[in-house]
Image (tube, rainbow, N blue to C red):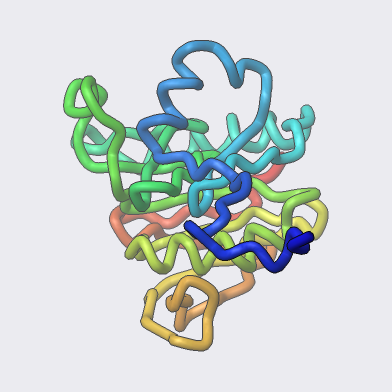
Amino acid sequence: MTALLDRPQVRQSIGPRPHRWTCEEFHNIGDAGMLEGQAVILVDGEILAMPNPNPPHDSIVGIVDYKLKELFQPGYWVRIQSGLPTALDTDPVPDIAVVRGSPRDYFTQHPRTAVLVVEVSDSSFDYDVGLKSNLYAAAGILDYWVIDVNGRQLIVFRDPIADAAAPRGFRYASTQVLSVGDSVTPLAAAAAIAVADLLP
């Protein structure tokens, strides 16, 4: 009797494999309500579950939204937890993204870049200052901020550069940690904002 492993190979055996989602598919299932109530993002084709927002997180997102709308005049749109596809298979759905134009400019598609991205970070801090910073650097986001809720500080990432040793091949050359006594000026705005005004 011929052993099972001795049988001649007619064709390569193909087993089950994970499905890699595109941004279009990701948005379609979201529009269909299949992701309702879930905090999820899409990175490299994988749908990742994020910690559900808590009251401090949502409060700070609202505070930052108000402050940025004071700085950015018509010609910019401050978007909250909305799609921002940075690749065909990646949409990090940032807490806040400031994009050029108005809501009318994005009626049929999400913006693909932003002049400023802000993540409000508590339990996801390591991810936000780590891999997610590489993701935004790879997308060419020039101004990326992480509000450290627990540390009551602001980390500002700027100057994305190619780096073969970094995840996704990019990183930020400039990282600045600001405390509540400091202020920061967005690259795309003319006025400064106090870090204390971004916190409760």
In the rendered image, residue 143, in percent from the top left (x then y), is placed at: 40, 62
Residue 65 appears in the picture as rendered = yes
* Position of 169 relative to 103 (above/below): below
* Position of 196 relative to 6 (above/below): above
In the rendered image, residue 129, in percent from the top left (x then y), is placed at: 63, 65
Residue 94 appears in the picture as rendered = no
* Position of 116 relative to 156 (above/below): above
Q: Would residue 90 appear left or right of 38 to someone viewing this image?
A: left
The residue at the point 17 percent across, 28 percent down is 105
The residue at the point 59 percent across, 47 percent down is 17
The residue at the point 56 percent across, 75 percent down is 176
In the rendered image, residue 191, in percent from the top left (x then y), is placed at: 36, 54
* Farthest-out residue, top: 32
Picture quarter containing residue 141?
bottom left
In the rendered image, residue 187, in percent from the top left (x then y), is placed at: 33, 62
The residue at the point 75 percent across, 31 percent down is 52
Quick one: quadrant of the N terminus?
bottom right
Q: Nearer the viewer, residue 168 or 94?
A: 168
Q: Would residue 160 appear left or right of 4 to someone viewing this image?
A: left
